[in-house]
Each structure stands twice: as structure tokens, then as C-alpha cells.
Image: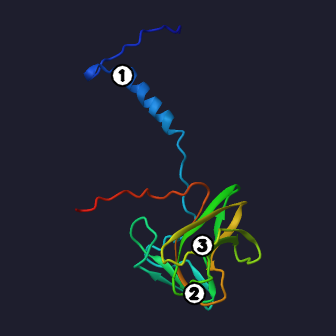
Amino acid sequence: MPLTSKPIRVVALAGGISVAAAVLGLLIAAGLNSNRAIAAPNRVQNGTFDSNVSGWTAVNSGTITWDETKNAGPGAGGSALVGGNSWFVSSCMSVGVGTHNFGASVALLGSEALGTNGFVRVRDCGNTAAVRADTPRQPNNDGNFHPVSATFTGSGSVEVVVFFDTLMSWQGWFDNVFVADGPLDTPTPTETATPT
């Protein structure tokens, strides 16, 4: 059966916009959106401590409790209040080949924090000697949360360790602990109007 060409009919919409123009606009918008970076999910289970500290283990004689009164935001929730001569380990997680972002928000208790630095480490699961990377140390003892982050490269099964590098007793908070394969998928904070 021979192919025959037929004219294409353009139907005018209200306001004089044609269907063809509307379709073209949708295709252009879809093309623009396809170039957007897709945020990566957080691989750490319970890294935001929204309602508890489950999935985290204190090593040695340290303590880890949920503090509902302090969080790094955004939104409601809590943080992990940690203390003692110890460090705190997450559940294991698998990461694929590539470069991964990791970090947390750290707050140090002012009266205990002199000479103390909080930081986050990624290592192979269950292997204290197989350190992948550390974040920079966070030395501020003002009681406010300060972000620390870094990257590591590789694949396999890893765990996150959060601690302070000091031998004295200390106390502080961790929140928003993350490992992600790219930019982290986090809600964008919005400004709120303050009543006058």
C-alpha cells in the first residue's frame, strides 16, 4: 500500500495558541528539566535522629541518647547526645563505585569541649584499621551545630563513625549524618514570616 502524505491540521486553542506551539513548549520544558542534577538519597539509616538513636552503637563506655530538644534542622526531630570516652558506629551500608559525599552537623558542649574536636569517619564495616576518610575537625565549643563534610572514593560495605578526638570526658551532639553518591537530597529551608 503506497504511503500518501496528508496535510497536518493545526487546531487553534483559546487565546490563539496552537496545539503545535503548546506541544513544542512542553518539549522544551522537558528538555530543560532533563539537565537538572538529581539529588542522591542518604544511605545512613537514622542519620537524622528524628525520634530515636536506633541503628547506632556506642563502643567502649560511652553513652548515646536521643535529645528531642536540639536538632540541626531543617524541620522537627532531635539529635544524638553523646558522651564518654567512646565513639559511635552506624549500621553498615553498601556503596557503589565512585565518589561519595559524607558528613554531619556537630555541636560541642561549651563547658566540656576545650581541646576537643568533633568529626566523622567512614571506614570498612567492622574494620577499625580500614579508614576510608575523615571530615575536617570541628573545634567550635559554642553549643551550635556546625557542618563537617568530605568525600571518599571506592565501593563496598562501609560504616560511619562519629566521635571527638580527645581522651577527656566530653559531651556533644551529632545530627544529619549522611553518606550519599552525589549532592544530598535535603529539603530546602524556607523563610518564615516573623509577626510584628
Residue assigned mark 2: 170
Indicate whether 82 appears above or below 47.
Answer: below
The 10 Å Cα crowd at callout 1, few under 14, some 14 to 19, many 20 or more, is: some
Question: 81 left or right of 84?
Answer: left
Q: Disc 3, disc 1: CB below 8 Å? A: no
Q: Please tell me in which quadrant of the rendered image residue 124 appears.
A: bottom right
Question: 22 left or right of 132?
Answer: left
The 10 Å Cα crowd at callout 3, few under 14, some 14 to 19, many 20 or more, is: many
Going from the N terminus, do you reach mark 3 or mark 1 first?
1
| Residue at image point 64% right, 72% down | 137
The 10 Å Cα crowd at callout 2, few under 14, some 14 to 19, many 20 or more, is: many
Residue assigned mark 1: 19
In the image, which is nearer the foreground, mark 3 or mark 1? 3
| Residue at image point 47% right, 76% down | 79
Residue 18 percent location from the top left of the image: 34, 20
Indicate whether 131 appears above or below 18.
Answer: below
Residue assigned mark 3: 138
Residue 175 percent location from the top left of the image: 51, 72
> In the image, what residue type sits under mark 3?
Gln
Q: Please tell me in which quadrant of the rendered image residue 100 appears.
A: bottom right
Decide which of 20, 189 is in the foreground and name it: 189
| Residue 177 appearing in the image | no
> In the image, what residue type sits under mark 1?
Val
Residue 189 percent location from the top left of the image: 41, 58
Residue 170 percent location from the top left of the image: 57, 87
* SS state under label 3: loop
Q: Disc 1, disc 2: CB below 8 Å? A: no
| Residue at image point 73% right, 78% down | 128
